[in-house]
Structure formats: structure tokens, C-alpha cells
Image: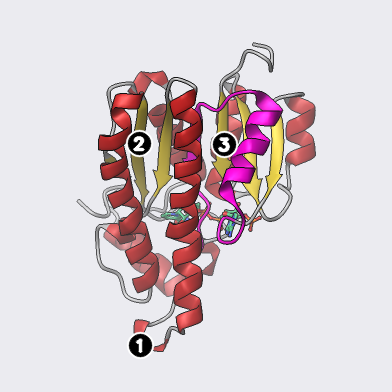
Amino acid sequence: MSAADSRVALISGASRGLGLAIAELLLADGWSVAALSRSRPETLDAMQDRWPGNVHWVKADVAQDDMRAQVRAVTDRFGRLDVLVNNAGVLHQELFLTTSERRIDELFATNLVGPTRLAQACARRMSRGGGGSILNVSSINSIRGFRGVTPYSAAKAGLDGLTRSAARELGPLGIRVNSIVPGYFESSMTAQVTDENRTRITHRTPLGRLGTTEEVAEIAAFLVSDRAAFITGQTITVDGGLTC
Ligand SMILES: NC(=O)c1ccc[n+]([C@@H]2O[C@H](COP(=O)([O-])OP(=O)(O)OC[C@H]3O[C@@H](n4cnc5c(N)ncnc54)[C@H](OP(=O)(O)O)[C@@H]3O)[C@@H](O)[C@H]2O)c1
């Protein structure tokens, strides 16, 4: 499929980890991808060589920048927008009683406020283009309590609330909205997990290991595709059974 005919996904946090894995899967499937992040994706040149014309990097900070301008930049480049994968996120582990107000603001800005603005900017564009699909990347911290991640958990739970209500409002416009709720998977985010906690997580997970970015990306790619055309407003857990 030529770049001009392909469907277009905007993926936030596509410079590494899960976002990058989703970008590579969609590109291999013939999509065009706008990869949004603060730093240049490590594999940008290789991706542009492999899929010429289908890859565009959007340099932006979801916590600070005007998301409407970023979405305009994507549609100026590709002429359409079919999918948002609202994946950018940050985790900071610290006990609630000692977390600074500045840190709380940063966690909410990156994990909830920015993604809400990005979802709105994309939904407005999708409503003019006849529909689309939004996938919010949440976390099992939104559905189970864990020590040391209180503001992060609250922000991710907020994202799931956005999913359900936006699905009600946007369904009649042909826009589906879902959340994927990953358990622990290997990435730079979980590189911070101590060996002791890693052992604890592994023991509590029925499948006995952390997931991989590819395993979570497969479900994300399914949820944004037409194969999931009748799924909206849902939170789909991919956690090796940790929360069952
Ligand atoms: N890893 C896990 O076990 C796990 C479990 C459950 C949920 N999740 C969620 O899954 C998503 C991806 O996590 P990951 O493990 O792949 O993380 P990661 O490897 O740390 O990647 C995070 C991505 O988000 C981008 N990002 C962070 N802050 C940003 C900002 N302010 N503006 C724009 N981009 C920003 C980063 O790019 P730059 O730094 O270049 O901006 C990077 O591309 C996150 O939402 C995370 O909360 C992860």
C-alpha cells in the first residue's frame, strides 16, 4: 500500500518501549505513523528507510505543548487521522506522604491532563473525517492498589474514566475509545524495578514472568483495527493474570 493510501495513527510516546513496538507493528501492516515524543526515536532513521514516506516524528511534550497544533501538524503531513494511541506516560515511585506537590502535578500533567487534551484534539479531527479509534494506555495500577504509585494510579484511573464517558459521547460520531490495561512488561520504565520487587511480581503472576512490549502491542494493534469494530468503552487487561 502506498503512503498516500494508508491509514494514519498518531502514537504518543513512540520513541521507545511499548509505543515504539506498536508503531513498528502498524507500519509493518501498511499504516503511516506519526510518532510523538520529546526525544528523537532511536530507530527513526531505520524506520524511515524501511517504510519511506510512512513515518513522521512529532517533537512535543504532552505535559506542556498545545496538542491541537501537534494534531494539525500530523494532518498537514498525512492528510488524515484514523487512530490515536495515547501511550506516553511517566512513572515515579515514591511513598504518597513524601511526594512533592510539583511531582504530583507532573504525574497528572503527563499521564492524564496532556492525554485528555490530545484525545480531544484527535476526536475533533476524527469527527470531521468520519470516525476513528482512540486507545488509551492505562495500567493495572488503575484497577488495583499498589504502594508507592498513588498519583500515577489516580491519573491512570482517570484515563479509564475518560475512556468510558468519551466512548458514550463519541460512539455516535463513529469514534471508538478503549483502554488497554497492561501489567508489568519489560521497558525502560520497569528497568527501575528492584530485583526484590521483580521477584515478587513474578511470583504473583500466574504466567510467572513479566510481559514483553510485543505481547502488549499485539493487543493494542487489534483494538485500534477494524477487527475490533464493535468494541468501545472497554478496559482490556493484558497482565499474565496478575489481577485475576
Ligand atoms: N512498563 C510497564 O510495565 C507498564 C505497565 C503498565 C502501563 N504502562 C504504561 O505504558 C505506557 C508506555 O510505557 P513504557 O514502559 O513503554 O515506557 P517507556 O519505555 O518509559 O516509554 C515512555 C514513552 O513516553 C514518552 N514520554 C514520556 N513523557 C512524555 C512527555 N511528557 N511528552 C511526550 N512523550 C513522553 C517517552 O518519550 P520521551 O522521553 O522521548 O519523551 C517514551 O517514548 C505508559 O503510559 C506507561 O504508563 C507501562
Mark on residue 97? 1
Residue type at tag 3: Leu
Residue lying at 36% horizontally and 82% vertically, measured from the top left: 96
Ligand 1 within 8 Å of the CB at mark 1: no
Q: Does the residue labelled 2 lie within 8 Å of ligand 1?
A: no
Q: Where, by quadrant of the figure, is residue 71 drawn?
A: top right
| Residue ranking furthest to the bottom | 98
Q: Residue at x 55, y 28 (%)?
A: 81
Figure quadrant, ligand 1 = bottom right
Res 194 visible: no
Residue 14 image offset from top left, x and y in percent: 60, 45
Towards the viewer: 67 or 10: 67
Quadrant the N terminus occupies: top right
Q: Residue furthest left?
A: 244
- Give the Cα distance between marks 2 and 3: 14 Å
Find out whether the residues at labels 1 and 2 contact each other: C-beta distance under 8 Å.
no
State the residue at coordinates (24%, 54%).
Answer: 243
Task: For mark 1, give the secondary structure.
Answer: helix
Please provide percent x and percent y for residue 116: 43, 51
The residue pinned by badge 3 equals 10
Magenta range: 62-91
Q: What element carries label 2?
A: strand
Q: Residue at x 67, y 55 (%)?
A: 38
Name the amino acid type tagged 1. Answer: Leu
Crowd tier of the residue under label 3, counting other residues whose Cα lies within 10 Å: few below 14, some 14–19, many 20 or above: many
Q: What number of labels is visible?
A: 3
Q: Name the residue under label 2.
A: 177
